Image (cartoon, rainbow, N blue to C red):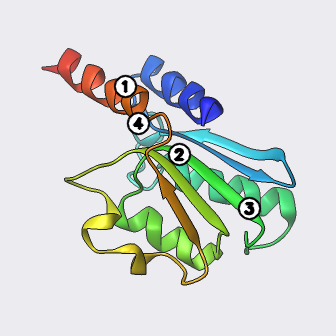
Amino acid sequence: MRKAIEEAKLAESMGEVPVGAVIICDNQIIARAHNLTEHLSDITAHAEILAITAASEFLGSKYLTDCTLYVSLEPCPMCAGALAWSQIGRVVYGAGDDKRGFMRFGKELLHPKTELAFGLFHDECADLMKNFFKARR
């Protein structure tokens, strides 16, 4: 999760919403990404989507069954859908997102075999978001 937080801070330094993600496979980081929606003018350029794409390219497979995603913020429904299609093995997120997070709709948005964990470095991840939006107001 520390590496995901580093990615979130990179996003913040670029004026992006501070969300970062890394994907681990066989105890190795195979993908890292952060939000680039503003930079790319692409609403789908969420950290999770970019990390899924990078991991799939690294593995040469669209399935990430033996991988774990660490992401600083609870994924949105769009990202949860992409994670479901990738059949990722495990998702771990830091801070929850009561307004836009997928858990409003239930864990069923993920693949049935995907393990879910949350709250890792919750306060640090939540503070990144709070401070970012507080500075914008």
First in sequence, mark 2 or 4: give its number: 2
**Real-space Cα separation, disc 4 to disc 3, in angstroms:** 21 Å
At label 4, the amino acid type is His
Which residue is label 3 attached to?
67
Q: Residues within 10 Å of mark 4 (few under 14, many from 20)?
A: some
Q: Residues within 10 Å of mark 2 (few under 14, many from 20)?
A: many
Residue 3 picture location, percent across and down: 65, 31
First in sequence, mark 4 or 3: give its number: 3
**Real-space Cα separation, disc 1 to disc 4, in angstroms:** 10 Å
Callout 2 touching callout 4 (CB < 8 Å): no
Residue 77 picture location, percent across and down: 36, 67
**SS label for mark 1:** helix
**Real-space Cα separation, disc 1 to disc 3, in angstroms:** 25 Å
Residue 39 picture location, percent across and down: 46, 34
Residue visible at 27% across and 74% down? 105
Which residue is label 1 attached to?
128
Q: Residues within 10 Å of mark 1 (few under 14, many from 20)?
A: many
Left or right relative to 67: residue 87: left
At label 3, the amino acid type is Cys
Q: Which mark is residue 71?
A: 2
**SS label for mark 4:** helix
Residue visible at 54% across and 23% down? 10
Residue 55 picture location, percent across and down: 74, 56
Residue visible at 73% across and 46% down? 31
**SS label for mark 2:** strand
At label 2, the amino acid type is Val
**Real-space Cα separation, disc 2 to disc 3, in angstroms:** 13 Å
Q: Nearer the viewer, residue 88 or 137?
A: 88
First in sequence, mark 2 or 1: give its number: 2
Q: Which mark is residue 26?
A: none
Picture quarter containing residue 88? bottom right
